[in-house]
Amino acid sequence: MRDQFNKVSRRDLLKRAGAIAAAGAASGPLLAPSIVRAAAEIEKEELKFGFIKLTDMAPIAIAKEMNFFEDEGLYVTVEPQANWKVLLDRVITGELDGAHMLAGQPLGATIGFGTKAHVITPFSMDLNGNGITVATSVWEEMKKYIPIGSDGKPMHPIKAEALRKVVDRYRAEGKPFNLGMVFPLSTHNYELRYWLASGGIHPGFYSPTDSSGQIMGDVLISVTPPPQMPSTMQAGTILGYCVGEPWNQQAVFKGIGVPVITDYEIWKNNPEKVFGVTAEFADKHPNTLIAITKALIRAGMRLDADNNANRPQAVKILAKSEYVGADPEVIANSMTGTFEYEKGDRRPVPDFNVFFRYFATYPYLSDAVWYLTQMRRWGQITEYKPDSWYAETARQVYRSDIYLKAAKLLVAEGKAKQEDFPWDSDGYRAATNEFIDGVTYDGRKPNDYLESLAIGLKHDQRVDGIKVVGN
């Protein structure tokens, strides 16, 4: 039974709402009365959240362990899920109130790729955090084609052209080159495909009748749950994979593989996970969702505060069996600002995991649009869509309005600073070419972006059977 003496009473919440209102009155018209009332009118106090055993579920763990959820009058239990599909399905059915999700999952569900349901996110959980790892045998072949720096170590970022030589040999010998990713709608799938395509390796298409994603592919990419990646590669079933931490560092720790590139090097400061709920949950429990978002924002702030000074504590929390349950040393490799490539080749990567700086927690529409472009590029979206469709779909799913209501409350309570949030943003980041291939992405012009990519579907092209048709 929950300790009733730790429970925040309705009277306490009303007192807090009054204090917030007073703060708002003193500092100007920051808060509308309806936002102030949200602090007191929690529609659902007891909640269950799902997650996958990855270090980037950290905001949920920290919000729970630091009592940020309880500060909002919420009593949260958390539960690891077997895989991303099970997690999404359980959120849709209501078995879970919300979950740590892949950034593309709410979008894919909303447009009907796989399970059809309107899922939204008011909160981006992190930036970066993934890597691409290859088996040691593959790495030894790749190294022949990678320039060596003055320090005697391979020069980074490592381009996919080096892997192409290995893939070509496998194809010439009639052997499949199998790679793993965690879910068809995952950041990992799109990052792996992006990196491969940038080096001239075709990752394969999806079609309405073939969900393998392997049509016309030079490699065969399939799904493997994150914690099983190292053992699956060790067994020889796959020759490499794209996954979040700690499962790249686990391959180094076990001596079975080498991470060749991080997603920070593929797309600098890319959005990785989000917190997702159904639109029905958001409509039925609007104040609860604001309270959840407040707690998660505070967790992100804590994780990045004082140049990551709280990360060692976070490592200890994540190492617990109820969260990630991996060796603390393995988790710390990336969480504390370093990343190990080859055994002993440890390099500083201070932004490998970003949980708050660079407005990491704000759900940018341009991030959503990028995921939609990749779904179209590889055939998950089967037909041409106008730019307006991308913008409208992004706005249905990435809910910055909810985020900013939570942020305003935190500022009024003195728990965050005004400058911590992008109040004047229209939801679109500035155009950027900070990708491994140097191609410029502008979220306002998704079709121009798609046309600029060397490999992938163009304009009205579609995949019909085993070939691409159209102009």
Image (cartoon, helix red, strand yellow):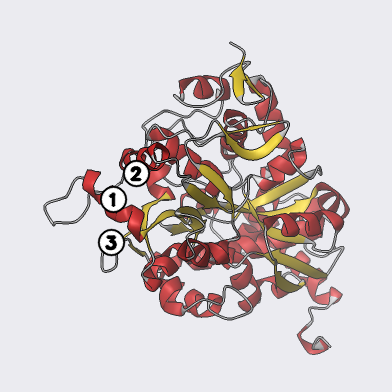
- Tell me the CA gap for discs 2 and 1: 7 Å
Q: Would you name the residue on which mark 2 appears?
A: 166
Q: Is residue 334 left or right of residue 320?
A: left
- On the question of residue 336 being in view, the answer is yes
Q: Nearer the viewer, residue 386 or 413?
A: 386
Residue type beneath disc 1? Glu
Q: Circle 3 is placed at which residue position?
A: 347
Compared across the picture, whether 168 is left or right of 461 comes to: left
Circle 3 residues within 10 Å: few <14, some 14–19, many ≥20 = few
Location of residue 221 with respect to 383 vertically, above or below: below
Q: Which mark is residue 141?
A: 1
Question: Badges 2 and 1: C-beta atoms under 8 Å apart?
Answer: yes
Instruction: Please tell me which residue is depicted at 76% across the width and 57% down the height of the picture.
Output: 289
Instruction: Mark 2 or mark 1: name the one nearer the start of the chain.
Output: 1
Q: Secondary structure at mark 3?
A: strand
Disc 2 to disc 3, C-alpha distance: 26 Å
